[in-house]
Amino acid sequence: MIELQDVTHDYGGGALFENVTASLDPGSFHFLTGPSGAGKSTFLKLCYGELRPSRGSVAVGGSDLRAMSRDELAAMRGTIGVVHQDCQFLDHLDVRANVGLPLHATARPVADRDIEDLLSWVGLNAQADALPPTLSGGERQRAALARAVITAPRLLLADEPTGNLDWDMSQRLLSLMIELNRMGTTILIATHDMNLIRTAKSQVSSRVLRIAGRRLQSAGADL
Ligand SMILES: Nc1ncnc2c1ncn2[C@@H]1O[C@H](COP(=O)(O)OP(=O)(O)OP(=O)(O)O)[C@@H](O)[C@H]1O
Ligand SMILES: [Mg+2]
């Protein structure tokens, strides 16, 4: 689903990582971990084409992102769900409308019940009519995950999706992502939360990638 070939990325101050080659199979469940500043968010941005690598190639679903036109890139992004580390919303639309937005970009009719069910699952029923600026940090994360999964995307890239959540809610969101994975969605989650990784590993076959020291490595079974 995601193929990186000899990827090097440099924002201008020296390479963040060098010659990274990785392959994430369709239907797989991966965590991405590593110290703050190592490049986890950068790695995710390379995967959905927000950034182009300084060298090397990134392919999603078999298509090399370098070869895509702007329209093709936009169409590709429409098939993946992304939770950004800094969750941004359309602040003049309420939470329900923000969560439902990706459905408008697909040909599918907007299923109001799906939105209500999802809001209920992430515990945001009471905030459905609220505007995003009035939400807490954790509520924003829950709304961002709901928005990212509303279309049941083929790929979910989630950047610290549980960073501001208590443990019960983190587990609830994790189970939502595990359920999606069982339905076929490829999942890549950047996180510092080792408890989340351990809990996931007891429920789903998953692998852990670690970025550190300009390298991407497979973390061992010691987690
Ligand atoms: N647009 C940018 N321009 C220049 N440098 C950047 C840019 N974005 C990120 N960086 C730098 O690249 C490095 C990696 O950033 P990145 O956000 O990928 O790290 P991270 O592993 O996600 O960290 P965290 O765990 O804190 O979220 C950091 O040193 C950061 O300052
Ligand atoms: Mg980050």
Image (cartoon, rainbow, N blue to C red):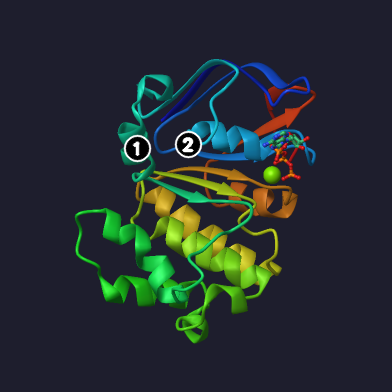
| Image label count | 2
State left or right for residue 199 relative to residue 29.
Answer: right
**Mark 1 vs 2, N-terminal side:** 2
User: Quarter of the picture for ligand 1?
Assistant: top right
Residue 11 position in % (x across, y down)? 69, 26
| In the image, the residue with mark 1 has its CB under 8 Å from the nearest atom of ligand 1 | no
Which element carries disc 1, helix, strand or loop? helix
Q: Residue at x 55, y 59 (%)?
A: 88
Q: Is residue 220 visible?
A: no
| In the image, the residue with mark 2 has its CB under 8 Å from the nearest atom of ligand 1 | no
Residue 48's label in the rendered image is: 2
* Label 1 close to label 2 by CB (< 8 Å): yes
Residue 173 vertical position relative to residue 85 in the rendered view, above or below = below
Q: Residue at x 60, y 64 (%)?
A: 171
Q: Amino acid at mark 1?
A: Met
Residue 115 figure quarter = bottom left
State left or right for residue 83 relative to residue 86.
Answer: left
Where does the C terminus fall, quadrant-wise? Answer: top right
Q: Residue at x 60, y 18 (%)?
A: 54
Residue 191 position in % (x across, y down)? 68, 47
Residue 178 position in % (x across, y down)? 48, 53
Residue 93 figure quarter = bottom left
Which element carries disc 2, helix, strand or loop? loop
- Residue under label 1, please give it: 76
- The residues bearing labels 1 and 2 have C-alpha atoms spaced at a distance of 8 Å
Residue 103 vertical position relative to residue 114 in the rendered view, above or below = above
Q: Is residue 189 visible?
A: yes
Where does the N terminus fall, quadrant-wise? Answer: top left
